[in-house]
Image (tube, helix red, strand yellow):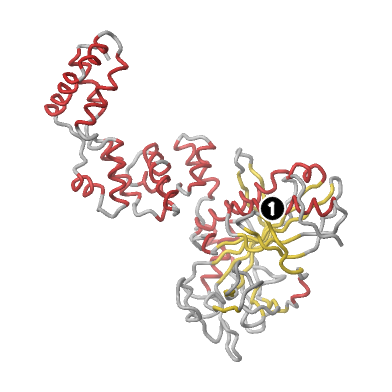
Amino acid sequence: MTVTTDLVSYEDALASYDPVMGLEVHVELGTKTKMFCGCSTELGAEPNSQACPTCLGMPGALPVVNAVGVESAIKIGLALHCEIAEWCRFARKNYFYPDMPKNFQTSQYDEPIAFNGYLDVQLEDGEVFRVEIERAHMEEDTGKSLHVGGATGRIHGASHSLLDYNRAGIPLIEIVTKPIEGAGERAPEVAKAYVAELRELIKALGVSEARMEQGQMRCDVNLSLRPHGREKFGTRSETKNVNSLRSVERAARFEIQRHAAVLNSGGTIIQETRHFHEDTGSTTSGRVKEEAEDYRYFPEPDLVPVAPSREWVEELRAGLPEQPLARRNRLREEWGVTAHDMQSILNAGAIDSIVATIAAGADAASARKWWMGELARTANESGVSLDALAITPEQVARVTALVNEGSLNDKLARQVIEGVLKGEGTPDEVVEKRGLKVVSDEGALTTAVEEAIAGNAAIADKIRGGKVAAVGALVGAVMKATRGQADAARVKELILEKLGVEG
């Protein structure tokens, strides 16, 4: 068996092999309590302060299924066009790991609550790719290991490890795709687009915030290569717990290149888990991967089966929100933007903010302008998401209203937004405190225009001589004199009137 860390070029890998992917996405549900006990799921608590005999697997402690968790699982299954089981049950997945206090994970094995579905995802160029869903099943999260004393935060090189069981028992839904074939060179892009679309769907359902940076949604990227013309899949690797869209794409791409290098050198792919490294975009070996039978699954004896009534399932189906892809296509048409523009809005996480701003009275163009311009820039510089900024869609709508009614120009509006973000109050309060209203007094404007003309006689003569473009210099002088608080368009009109020149 040959092991190599060399890579072949991406183009050379695709020239010889077809990539086949399988994506397993874990979604942490936003329930108030854990999946099988009443412990709180709130983030940020002291380590091991949200654990009880049930989630620690103490003798005699009996679990009870979280009804909201079941409901969330059904909603996800329905939104993924899955069949919902009339009867299913939990199973014990047996393995030892330090952060598994029970030495087994309560999950579902051969009887998932949802199965045989699909999700259509749109790629950057507008092409729609259908990803088939194998199953979506309920399970619980493990605890958390903190490895101390090493340089990498991993167990290798650490002096000791600490265990926090607050997360043990947090409800999860695991969504598993069928083998994704036929994507070819676009396989990494498909992987990224699928996880992105799934995240939008989860958020739309309201069952989780799906913040990947907080571990609320994470993806295992299974990948194998097979030579062109063959039907049998190659041996797969599983890159675990990838927690950003960009990293999903990078992990798939790296593994394609690594697999190809191993195969081209005559080596054998090891079925194993791998770790993804954000800094280098590479993966390293984790542990040899067990087959399903090695987990010794058997039905969970302490939990009754789950048998959702058809009436309940149909009631949940009727309450599903619009599919994110369909919603984006509808909004794109309503807003009159290109597919590329809508993709940019999606990537910025601005869709909901823009929709809410329009609902608060702004026109679509103005709402897009501020969220995708000034506010997106501020969010990027601050390293936060748009929805984490200290400004509401209603406040942005008020700024656009002040601009439209002539009380603010764009320059002043930017200062108002800056003031709101700094906590100086509402847009109207910032305008008042900073004295930012547009100078609309015709007398004051006329005086400023006359002073600008008198102070720039040579430029005024050029304008009178037909070089109307030179008016910009006089407009600039007036804007400076009024501290940017004049209406530039009105200033230009007044200057041309005073000089007797047609605009």
Which residue is nearer to you in this view: 227 or 300? 227
Quarter location, residue 483: top left
- At horizontal 67% and vertical 68% (from top left) the residue drawn is 112
Q: Secondary structure at mark 1?
A: helix
Question: Is 482 above or below relative to 31?
Answer: above
Amino acid bearing label 1: Ala
Quadrant assignment for the N terminus = bottom right
Q: In the rendered image, which residue does mark 1 sit on?
A: 252
The image position of residue 123, as x and y in percent, is: 62, 43
The image position of residue 57, as x and y in percent, is: 60, 85
Binning the other alpha carbons within 10 Å of mark 1 as few (below 14), some (14 to 19) or many (20 upward) gives many
Outermost residue to the left: 443
The image position of residue 124, as x and y in percent, is: 60, 41
Quadrant assignment for the C terminus = top left
- At horizontal 24% and vertical 34% (from top left) the residue drawn is 484
- At horizontal 61% and vertical 38% (from top left) the residue drawn is 125
